[in-house]
Amino acid sequence: PAKIKPPQLKALTGSREPNRSQVDLPLVDTLPLAPDWLEETAAQEFTRLARILHNNRLLTEASLSPLAVLSLIYGRIVSICRAGETPHASLIAQYRAFVSDFGITPASASRVLPNSGPTKENRFAKHCK
């Protein structure tokens, strides 16, 4: 896959399209606690992934619910495996889709850009067009 150009570079080269710009959602300031409705294994996975995403500036207010669902799916897969059964392919597919959306796998990491935080004024903008 092609590498994604950072939004700042797109703005400088003039190839930034407003309708394709990445939306900067508000970042989570502190590590959140796992929802109380998650089972123990799922709650541990939520905490582990939340720490990783938070440290990489990828954990936003909007991503907390999907992260909880990802952790729930993980917990179900683990409990099914502990029971000596094989998880259904649809459950594995849901897990893979969520993991890919968060950029957790090496293959999907390049498609997810960290939140750039507050934007600074472009001091060169006055010289454009």
Image (tube, helix red, strand yellow):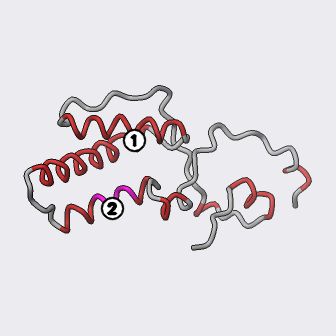
Question: In the displayed structure, would residue 45 be above or below residue 70?
Answer: above
Q: Which residue type carries mark 2? A: Arg
The x and y percentages for residue 7 are 68, 56
Q: How many marks?
A: 2
Name the element at disc 1: helix
Neighbour tally class for label 2: few under 14, some 14-19, many 20 plus, Cα within 10 Å? some
Q: Chief secondary structure of the magenta span?
A: helix
The x and y percentages for residue 78 are 19, 49
Q: Quadrant of the N terminus?
A: bottom right
Instruction: Give me the residue at 73% from left, 61% from top.
Output: 10
Going by the picture, which residue comes out furthest to the bottom?
1
Q: CA distance from mark 2 to mark 1?
A: 15 Å
Label annotation for residue 96: 2
Q: Quadrant of the C terminus?
A: bottom right
The x and y percentages for residue 91 are 20, 61
Name the element at disc 2: helix
Q: Based on the displayed image, in which of its 4 quarters is residue 95 positioned?
A: bottom left
Going by the picture, which residue comes out furthest to the right?
127
Question: In the displayed structure, would residue 23 be above or below residue 38?
Answer: below
Question: In the displayed structure, would residue 7 be above or below residue 17?
Answer: above
Q: Based on the displayed image, in which of its 4 quarters is residue 36 positioned?
A: top left
Instruction: Give me the residue at 39% from left, 41% from top.
Output: 49
Q: Which residue type carries mark 1? A: Leu
Label annotation for residue 49: 1
Instruction: Give me the residue at 54% from left, 61% from top.
Output: 111
Instruction: Give me the residue at 41% from left, 37% from top.
Output: 50
Query: Position of 39 compared to 1: left or right?
Result: left
Between 113 and 108, which is closer to the camera in this rendering? 108
Which label's residue is closer to the chain start, 2 or 1?
1
Quick check: is 71 in the magenta stretch?
Answer: no
The stretch in magenta equals 95-99
In contact (CB < 8 Å): disc 2 and disc 1:
no
